Image: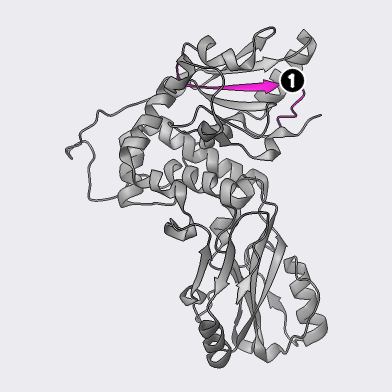
Amino acid sequence: MELESNFNFSYSIYIHDEIIQLFNEQSNYKIYFEKEFINPTIWDEVENESISHLYYLLKNGFLTDSFKELFSAFHDTFWYKKSVYRDLLKFGIRIPPCLQSHTEEGNKREYDFDPGRTLMKEAKFVGLDNIPMFIQVQKDDNIKYGGKINTIEDLKEILYKEVKLDSEIILKEDDRFPVAYDGTNLNKFSIHESGNKKSGASGHGTYMADVNNIEYRLGFYKILTNSFPLNVYVSADTETEYESCVGRIETDYYFTGNENLNLLKTKWDYEQVFYPYDKYNISIDEVKLNFIWLKDDSMYNIPKLNNYKGFSIYTKSEIRWDKNILGLLFYGHTEETLAKHDDSVVLFNCENPIWKYTNNPSEEHVGLLPKHYYLVD
């Protein structure tokens, strides 16, 4: 069975017909597939979590975060999130999340996104407000529904009105992330994607190699050490426009502490383990923004203006900036000269050697930024 992918990406999702038949015959579940399920993640939550990962990396140093990834909490590191964000932005969701139902005592229903709660947060960070979704319901409910199930509320309405359940539907914690465990374990489903042969962990592919490449991580971290104070070049016609833009950026610029991140707790002590690299550190007191009014110079002169050091950001003054500007750092890369959606906002990698020879890099050296950073007042 082939399922058309959401968004305009060049791949399709396949579930082998034999697996579908086996699932239909040996389970009490059936599956709906919705191409545009409304992502229930709240932006502030995922942004806070993402900036926390950046904060942890900057505060505790390169080796600490690397060992934390390798031996403790792989998903709770800057490196993992960075790779997933870049991959989602370029290719979209390869393996959709699944909203599962589970029967508790007294014929009560509980619902949980599994797998997929973390993936929905990551999708939200790159601007995927509507996502493909598998919805698993019990055959005993005898649902015959030909419409759309775009939200959790849609599903609840079907269960209450069409199935006429006698008991309530349990949504633990809150209505966005109900928690339950489904013993059928849909993870055993043979789901794969076509169009990219380099799929890695959690269905993510080309950029995931960066997570396992310590030379890349070290090189990227070295660029970060040269990036602060972070220069933000603002293109504006008047001083009022410039100052207004600076004020909006500063309003949403913040750090979240690492209270919600587990400290490194393993048998490994990175101070005692032989490592072929120095322990690089960035003083958290130096992590500040430095604003520059770009009046006459072309934005492509910024690497030179930045002395070919670190990352820097260019923005036109009309950009709304209701998001933390530090989020752009997740999309930088050592082998790319810049990242952008269009020329209104650009993240420059000023240390890429190409800048010393040209201010017109080829497309193969240009990365992407999410469209939601480009909203204007």
Give residue 313's position: percent from left, percent from top: 59, 23
Magenta stretch secondary structure, dominant:
loop
Give residue 334's position: percent from left, percent from top: 43, 31
Please count the marks in the image.
1
Residue 312 part of the magenta-drawn span: yes
Residue 170 part of the magenta-drawn span: no
- The vertical placement of 184 against 40, above or below, is below
Please give left or right for residue 164 compared with residue 171 in the image.
right
Residue under the image location 21 percent in, 36 percent down: 271
Residue where numbered disc 1 is placed = 317
Is residue 14 among what the camera can see? yes
Q: Which residues are magenta?
A: 308-322
Corner quadrant of residue 130: bottom right
Q: Nearer the viewer, residue 180 or 19?
A: 19
Residue under the image location 37 percent in, 26 percent down: 222
SS type, badge 1: loop
Give residue 139's position: percent from left, percent from top: 66, 89
Please give left or right for residue 49 compared with residue 275 in the image.
right
- The vertical placement of 117 against 285, above or below, is below
Corner quadrant of residue 280: top left
Residue under the image location 64 percent in, 13 percent down: 298
Residue under the image location 60 percent in, 77 percent down: 1
Callout 1, which amino acid?
Answer: Ser
- The vertical placement of 208 against 287, above or below, is below
Q: Quadrant of the C terminus?
A: top right
Please give left or right for residue 364 compared with residue 5 in the image.
left
Q: Nearer the viewer, residue 125 or 21?
A: 21
